[in-house]
Image (spheres, coloured by chain):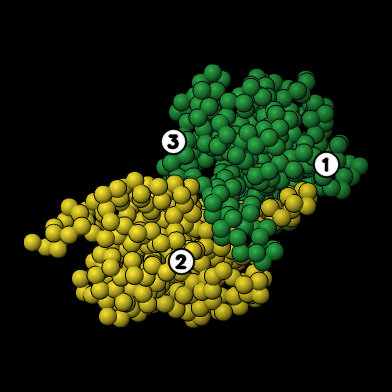
Chain colours: A yellow, B green
């Protein structure tokens, strides 16, 4: 008999959840042995509770994870898992699952809001509204159409595919970059560079991992034409930020929509705040009304699979 | 023989065109008898030149149009033609054509930019960027998804159809209102009221004419649920603006995107400027980079039809 069938799982809950979502977890775990840690009010028993757990729900600190000996499964509360790529000594039997797909709609909608916002003058109109200043003529001359644009989407996971679908509704000519995914037209940096050289819109939906880190280099950025708008809803680490900032300040790019940055929160002195034609969206791209409840429901559904010995959903690999 | 075959048309050009677009007109009219009036620098001979013309390109003032005796065709420089609905004594043979369809993409993109802007927090994020204030937590809790929303599109002309298509890319459940168009699910105010009572998004794409003026009454607006966002890219006269403003200020509506207003430009003391969760877009919805050239090309193409005795494109009727 496997351990699963002989022992009740011990569950460590550290995910950041709103009260309603936490109530869903409490309700689902009536028969379980579980411990809830509050990230903002750590208690003395937290570490010991984690170390004796077989299941964790939430993004446990990487150094603490390395100490785990009993842990069989960690359900992340995020899609990104780059924080764990350098972890050493993890049990080969430890399963880690993420929330892949949960943020595709909100992230793609934030990207579209920013992109259309730049093309349709929202970064001029919204401030003009505060000043009660009718700005028809000044704004109208700068407007662009997304319709028919040439777009490159970096990443062909759930966000990248959703993004592509939304751009296609505006009859954009979209090419996707991904090293291995079927359905991506661009598979290597050379063909990517070629596509970038005529792009109107570039949307980065890539996670941070060894194959994407720094991918959008100064050299690749330099291939973008002056009319291009760069959107990042993936991870800041994918992009050479100083090079991007330089190009925006020199107006060698038409604009940018930046949801994610290498440093978050951005400090007041960060040069991104000064970039012209740039909409910063403060890593809000994943937000949607039901997100905490959805995370709780996701964990509960995976827990059912775990208890029934079924394969977990969205298992990730830390191997490069 | 008809007059057309015996006489060279005399053309009066009063459309507002940028130099590049005016050059296109000059180039096309090398063999024609034409007169260009500059709306911003009127000259003494303008009126006489108009009165002897058989063709006008541009929106001639309604009272001047009533004096025309020679005019056979007026090509408007707009889609809207409500200014002429009250004209008296026009020749029954006078043909008027508009630019129907020319603004569908920019207008629908401005509506989407505003709508996604409200749902994804641009009206908080863009001002926060000016203050260098990272606002992830404050903004994220207010975000909504357009995906799967229930939408009502008022009008099923070119803008309404385009709008519907864009909303459907976000898997919205869309119903269109139009009295007579096939493909519109809602044909009368009663079924419209019913649909509005559960709407998340309402987009008005209606022109101003006797059948639409005041259609969105205080009573219809009152049927909207609190989560609804109201978008107007049609005409201000369609809506009871004081009622809309009251509902926004009382937070009985989630927000609004207003491109068109009964008074334009909006004066600084207008109450629209103070409405919460409201993005005003200053009648820029029709703007796109090529718009003046497109207007010139449109007129030139219709002129070819005129000269060849073919039916003109986009003939409008001033009859109710």
Q: Residue at x 26, y 60 (%)?
A: A10
- Give the labeled residue for mark 1: B269
| Quarter of the C terminus of chain B within the rendering | top right
User: Of helix, strand and loop, which one carries label 2?
Assistant: loop
- Label 3 resides on the chain identified as B
Q: Is residue B102 above or below residue A292?
A: above
Q: Residue at x 45, y 28 (%)?
A: B183
The numbered dot on residue B173 is 3
Quarter of the image where one finds residue B3: top right
Relative side of B130 to B42, left or right = left
Are there few (<14), some (14-19), or many (20+) residues within 10 Å of tag 1? few
**Distance between the Cα atoms at labels 2 and 3?**
45 Å
Q: Is residue B125 above or below residue A43?
A: above
Are there few (<14), some (14-19), or many (20+) residues within 10 Å of tag 3? some
First reached walking from the N terminus: tag 1 or tag 3: 3
Residue A204 x %, y %: 45, 66
Q: Is residue A254 above or below residue B26?
A: below
State whether discs 1 and 3 lie on one chain.
Answer: yes
In the image, A301 versus B254, the foreground residue is: A301
Residue A238 x %, y %: 45, 74
Q: Residue at x 79, y 39 (%)?
A: B270
User: Of helix, strand and loop, which one carries label 3?
Assistant: strand
The numbered dot on residue A283 is none
């Amino acid at each position: 008999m496997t351990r699963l069938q002989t022992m009740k799982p011990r569950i460590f809950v550290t995910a950041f959840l709103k009260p309603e979502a936490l109530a869903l977890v409490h309700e689902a775990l009536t028969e379980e042995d579980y411990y809830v840690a509050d990230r903002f009010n750590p208690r003395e028993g937290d570490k010991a509770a984690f170390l004796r757990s077989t299941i964790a729900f939430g993004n446990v600190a990487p150094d603490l994870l390395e100490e785990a000996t009993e842990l069989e499964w960690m359900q992340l509360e995020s899609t990104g898992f780059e924080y764990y790529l350098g972890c050493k000594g993890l049990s080969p039997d430890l399963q880690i699952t993420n929330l892949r797909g949960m943020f595709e709609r909100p992230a793609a909608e934030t990207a579209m809001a920013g992109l259309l916002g730049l093309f349709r003058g929202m970064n001029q109109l919204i401030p003009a509204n505060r000043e009660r200043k009718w700005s028809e003529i000044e704004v109208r001359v700068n407007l662009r159409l997304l319709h028919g644009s040439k777009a490159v989407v970096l990443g062909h996971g759930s966000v990248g595919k959703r993004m592509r679908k939304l751009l296609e509704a505006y009859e954009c000519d979209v090419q996707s970059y991904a090293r291995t995914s079927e359905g991506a037209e661009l598979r290597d940096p050379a063909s990517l560079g070629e596509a970038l050289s005529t792009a109107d819109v570039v949307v980065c939906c890539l996670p941070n991992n060894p194959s994407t880190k720094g991918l959008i280099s100064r050299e690749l950025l330099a291939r973008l034409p002056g009319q291009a708008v760069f959107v990042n809803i993936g991870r800041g680490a994918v992009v050479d930020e100083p090079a991007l900032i330089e190009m925006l300040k020199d107006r060698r790019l038409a604009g940018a929509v930046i949801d994610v940055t290498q440093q978050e929160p951005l400090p007041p002195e960060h040069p991104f705040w000064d970039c012209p034609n740039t909409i910063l969206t403060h890593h809000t791209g994943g937000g949607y009304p039901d997100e905490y409840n959805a995370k709780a429901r996701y964990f509960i559904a995976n827990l059912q699979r775990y208890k029934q010995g079924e394969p977990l959903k969205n298992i990730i690999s830390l191997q490069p």
